[in-house]
Image (cartoon, rainbow, N blue to C red):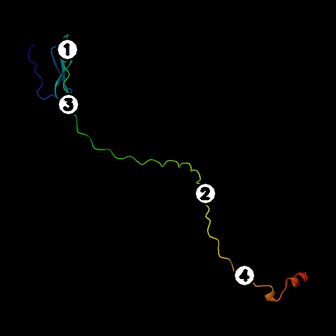
Amino acid sequence: MPAIDFPNSPSVNQTHTVGNRIWKWNGATWDVLRSSVSFSTGATGAVGNTGATGAVGNTGVTGAVGNTGATGLTGATGLTGVTGAGPTGATGPTGADADALGITIMTIMQAH
């Protein structure tokens, strides 16, 4: 097969026909679009090594604060405290004697 003489400065999507093959420039290489020559696909090559893991990205923005939850149930009422037993207060003063006021119990009773 003779060497193919491709254009020196092709534009993207430009085609070039050589014999029974049509080639198309993709901006980097010439791709075969159509060929009347029959061909078979070869065996698939081995899988290449896995590339290195990339750098960890920045931490994202903190999300919005959620709504406050419902208020819980009221707890049971506590026990009543012990009633205190304080000391008895002092005895009050003794009242005036009825005889000292010039009144007798009999006088009060007779008036009624």
Residue 86 point in image, percent of width and height: 61, 68
User: Which residue appears at 11% of the width and 27% of the height?
Assistant: 8
Instruction: Work out whether mark 4 precedes mark 2 in sequence or the reverse, and give the earlier one.
Output: 2
Instruction: Work out whether mark 4 precedes mark 1 in sequence or the reverse, and give the earlier one.
Output: 1
Circle 4 or circle 1, nearest the eye: 4
Give the residue pinned by disc 2: 80
Say what amino acid the circle numbered 4 marks: Thr
Instruction: Work out whether mark 2 precedes mark 3 in sequence or the reverse, and give the earlier one.
Output: 3
Instruction: Work out whether mark 4 precedes mark 3 in sequence or the reverse, and give the earlier one.
Output: 3
Residue 85 point in image, percent of width and height: 62, 65
Does residue 24 lie above or below 59 as drawn? above
Circle 3 or circle 1, nearest the eye: 3
Does residue 53 lie above or below 23 as drawn? below
- Circle 2 SS class: loop
- Circle 4 SS class: loop
Instruction: Work out whether mark 3 precedes mark 1 in sequence or the reverse, and give the earlier one.
Output: 1
Circle 1 or circle 2, nearest the eye: 2
Distance of label 4 from label 3 (alpha carbons): 110 Å
Distance of label 1 from label 2 (alpha carbons): 91 Å
Circle 4 or circle 2, nearest the eye: 4
Give the residue pinned by disc 4: 94
The disc label shown at residue 88, or none? none
Callout 1 crowding tier (Cα within 10 Å): few <14, some 14–19, many ≥20: few
**CB contact under 8 Å: marks 4 and 3:** no
Give the residue pinned by disc 1: 43
